[in-house]
Amino acid sequence: MAGAMLFRLYFCGFVVLVTLCFVGEAGAQTATDFTAWKDPKNAEFIQGWTQRMLSRFRDLTGTEREELLAKNLSALAEIASDSTIVFSTRYNAVLAIGQLDAKPDNPPVAYPAALTVMSDLYQQADSPHYLRCAALLGIVRHALCGVDSSQRDKVIDLFLETAMAEIETGHAVPLEPAVWDWFRCTSLDGLAAMKTTGANGKVAAELLALINRKSLEIETMLDRQDMFTLEAWKQLCRTIELASKAAKTLGDLDYSSATGIDTKKMTDSFIRLTLAVCDIQHKMAAEYIELEKTVPAPALLLEQIVMNVKIGVQSIVWGMRSGLLSAKPSENSFYLSLKNEDTEIKRLDTLMAEIVELSAFLDEGDKTKRTPAAPNMPKAFKFDLAELRDALKKCSESLAKITVEHP
């Protein structure tokens, strides 16, 4: 119930943030009276009032803007910290803090003092998770707008600590795994926005550790006997999604002037994750066929396996090349940062070739059986579960060979 409530708040807040980007309401350039915000009867109006409050900054500059920013930040922080106020109002107050801008440029210059307030709130052990959710969204917005150099390290560490942490147990309301994974994935969005690989490759190293931890979890699942239960499937999907998100985040970083990057460890991690995803999905397809299972339906299982494999391999391609499967490597990518004599180039090329072949199969089926698509026909997989099993096995065997040749 707590998780569902958190996500309802998140999506309501998201709608507010999108609206604020496009709609402004003219109003007198005066300070907002926040007294009415605290009345529970007005909770449903807070989103609209937030819009009006922010619109008052539209034409303000200089000292006048700075004074109003400080006044509103103080009032909003007070509302957020007051446990007697209804939670939706407190949540929206934190969202509003994240929207305060020092300058209305394009992109806007986010208000640095607001970042300090949100970071402190997020890291307080007794902060409700719905407030931490709102604070994290605001911190990520600051990362997208650009964080002042004096706060960059603090923000990077906050994102890393969240991304690397497993389910929290020290809070009054334990989080559901899916909800905590949302926090972790959102923190990875923040790291992607920061672009840096970190001092001496710290950010990249932490992300590799996360990928390897999740790859190990997938490898451990190979011994499970209950993989066709709903709970086991949800756990597998979450694990693949988080590992893939970390791989994709690596591709969002700038390697043009990076230092301290362990190129072999990076390549090893990409190969290991690809192999783990192919192995676990091959096992599920093979056991489903061999044990003559009927639940889930074969068409549904086929779709779920394809989705997981595509999420995994496409994220790994982005991690290597900072671009899509069909695009050339980005100039700031990990791949182009390697020297011509680096032995990892050959391994990455081999991995890329295997992913291209597997992806072509997932899109078009067995190349020896491909036929032109009939016009106006609905899209459907051009292979069955047995053919998918065989394709995953072939890819796994090739990847395992790369691992053996370069332990």
Image (cartoon, rainbow, N blue to C red):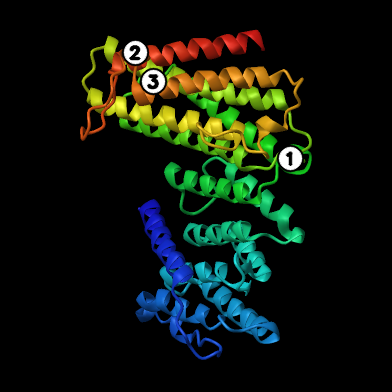
Q: Which residue is mark 3?
A: 361
Amino acid type, mark 2: Ala
| Real-space CA distance between mark 1 and mark 3, rounded to the nearest whole angstrom | 34 Å
Q: Which residue is mark 1?
A: 256
Q: Which residue is mark 2?
A: 286
Instruction: Tell which of 121 and 382 is nearer to you.
Output: 382
Counting from the top left corner in percent of width and height, residue 342 is at: 74, 21
The first of marks 2 and 3 along the sequence is 2
Q: Is residue 221 visible?
A: no
Counting from the top left corner in percent of width and height, residue 378 is at: 22, 34
The first of marks 1 and 3 along the sequence is 1
Counting from the top left corner in percent of width and height, residue 142 is at: 61, 61
| Real-space CA distance between mark 2 and mark 1, rounded to the nearest whole angstrom | 43 Å
Q: Residue at x 51, y 26 (%)?
A: 217
Residue 364: quadrant of the picture: top left
Q: Is residue 92 visible?
A: yes
Element under disc 1: loop
> Do the residues under discs 1 and 3 have CB atoms within 8 angstroms?
no
* Nearer the camera: disc 2 or disc 3: 3
Counting from the top left corner in percent of width and height, residue 190 is at: 59, 51
Question: Across the whole image, how many numbered discs are drawn on residues?
Answer: 3
- Looking at the image, is 170 positioned above or below residue 226? below
Amino acid type, mark 1: Ser
